[in-house]
Image: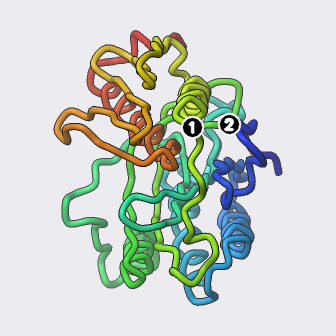
Amino acid sequence: MTAAPSVSGDPHDVRIGGFPAWPLPLDATGARIARSLVRTVFGELGMPGELTYDATLAISELATNAYVHGYGGGRPATGSPAGRPEMWAYLRWGARPEVVLKIFDSGPWREMGAEGPSRPPLTAESGRGLEVAHALTAVHGGQWGTHRTWSRLGARPVTGKAAFITLPIPSRCPAATMPLPRSPRETADRIHRLLETRGLNRLQRTEGHGMTVICVRAGVHMWVREDGILHYVPGRGGVRLALCDGIEAVEQVVRHCADLDATYGSPERGR
C-alpha cells in the first residue's frame, strides 16, 4: 500500500505531522484494511486499547458505508483509479490534541440533517453504520461528520466527500505533547504545496512584514504569521489556528472551496 507523496518527513508518521493517504480496495475488504491502518496509527501514537478498539469499529463502519452507499458496492463511475476510496489520518491541536481519521469516497453528496444520522427501521438488518460511528466517538468525547472535499490520490483530484471521526488523545500519551511549530515561512510553504496537490493550482502568494498571504481564489485568503494561521470562511468569520495546525487549515479551506464549487461551479481550479 502506498501513501501520497510526502511534503514533510515520513508521510505515514502522524506523530511528527505526517498526513498519510492510503488507497482502499473497492470491495468488502476495505473495512478490514481500514481497521488495520487504525491499529497501526494508534499503536504509534500510544493510544489506549479501549480507544483503539472503538476507533477501529467506527472507521470500519465508515469504510463499509462508503463502499455500499458511495459506490453502490461497485466501481466508481469514472472507471479509473481516481476517485476510489481513501483513508487519511492527521493530528490537530485546537483546544485539545486530537487524532482525525477520514474516509473519502467519490459518491454523490447527501445532506445530513442537524439531528445527525437517520435511524433505520428497527427491523432493518443494516444501515446503522453512521449511527454506530456517532455513538463510538461520542462516548470518548469525540465527534463525527461528513463534508465535501477532493481526493488526494490519483493523477488529479476528484470531487467527493469525507466521513470523519475525531478522538481526543489522552494526556498520558506521548503524542499529546504539541510538537515544536515550524516557522511561519515553513508552514506557509507546506500549506502552499498541500493546496496545490488538491487541484488549487492558481494560488497567488505575497510575503512581507513577517507574514505570508496566500490567495486561494476570489474571497478565500490565508494569512500565515508568527502568532498562527488565519483564514476567513463566510458564515463563520475568521478562523485562527496554531502554526502546528497547517493540515487542519488546509482541510477547512478545501472543504469551503468544494462547497463553493458545488454551489457555483468550478471555473478556477483548472482541472
Q: Residue at x 58, y 23 (%)?
A: 196
Residue 33 bears which disc, if any? none
Would residue 223 be found to the left or right of residue 119 on screen? Answer: right
Q: Residue at x 51, y 10 (%)?
A: 270
Q: Nearer the viewer, mark 2 or mark 1?
A: 1
Question: Foreground: 174 or 191?
Answer: 174
Q: How is the image coloured?
A: rainbow
Question: Foreground: 83 or 235?
Answer: 235
Work out whether residue 70 can be spotted.
yes
Badge 2 amino acid: Leu
Report x, y in % for residue 3: 76, 45
Q: Is residue 135 above or below residue 66?
A: below
Please tell me how many numbered marks the rendered image carries.
2
Q: Is residue 192 above or below residue 147?
A: above
Write down the quadrant of residue 84 in the picture. Answer: top right
Mark 2 = which residue? 153
Q: Earlier in the sequence, mark 2 or mark 1?
A: 2
Report x, y in % for residue 51: 55, 83
Callout 2: helix, strand or loop?
loop
Q: Residue furthest bottom?
A: 50
Q: Quadrant of the C terminus?
A: top right
Q: Residue at x 45, y 25 (%)?
A: 210
Q: Residue at x 41, y 41 (%)?
A: 228
Residue 183 bears which disc, if any? 1
Callout 1: helix, strand or loop?
loop
